Amino acid sequence: MDYDEDNVLVRYEKKVLDNETKYVMTSDLKDLFRPAWDSWREDKAVEAVNRLTHEATLARAAIKARCRKARIKAIEKLTNQPVLIFLAKYDWDRIICIAAIEKVNDQKVLAEIARSNTSNEVRTAAFKRLMSLVNDASNALDEIARNSKYCSVRKHGISKAAIVDLCN
């Protein structure tokens, strides 16, 4: 047994063909067909995730990759809210949960995580994300209240902005 340049364990088998001895490299089939984003080598996995564009493949990488940095990179590129919510609520790695929370837009889900997650860091991240969404909504309502050319929209925007300000 020997190691190749990628530090992957390989085996060499001795083959005799036409009275000529050759050594042929073999490895486990599962390693041959494993996606690059599922590599143990961090740089290789992150580089592979950077090349991904298909949402379903990004979701698989975010859930199943062996390397934490590759998972975080996949989460950063992911837009699929159900997958992000799944990771934010149920992943065992709190760093992955926090990375997913930063992309979740559902306020009810964020409130549930902030109330019931067992990790203090995850609860805090969910609370901060929820407050940033509320502040963004408040700013948007203020903008509507000030700049709409329709009186009824301005009045409705002012009343909603006042309600959001009371919540803060």
Image (cartoon, rainbow, N blue to C red):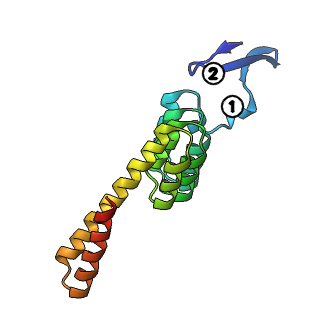
Q: Is residue 88 above or below residue 71?
A: below
Q: Is residue 88 above or below residue 19?
A: below
Instruction: State the image coordinates of residue 10 (x, y, percent, origin top left).
Output: 69, 20
- In the rendered image, the vertical position of residue 5 relative to residue 104, given as above or below: above
Q: Position of residue 126 (x, y in %)?
A: 45, 48
Left or right, 12 with respect to 108, comes to right
Left or right of 92 on screen, residue 75 = left
Q: Position of residue 81 (x, y in %)?
A: 51, 58
Residue that numbered label 1 is attached to: 31
**Number of the label disc, if any, that sits on residue 124:** none
Any mark on residue 8, and which? Answer: 2
The amino acid type found where label 1 is placed reads Asp
Query: Three-letter amino acid code at disc 2?
Result: Val
Marks 1,2: beta carbons within 8 A: yes
Q: Where is residue 56, by image quadrant?
A: bottom right
Residue at x-position 56% and y-position 19%: 5
Residue at the far front: name it: 166
Separation (CA) of disc 1 from disc 2: 9 Å
In the figure, residue 157 lies in which quadrant? Answer: bottom left
Write the residue at 62% across / 41% down: 64
Between 100 and 77, the one nearer to me in the picture = 100
Q: Secondary structure at mark 2?
A: loop
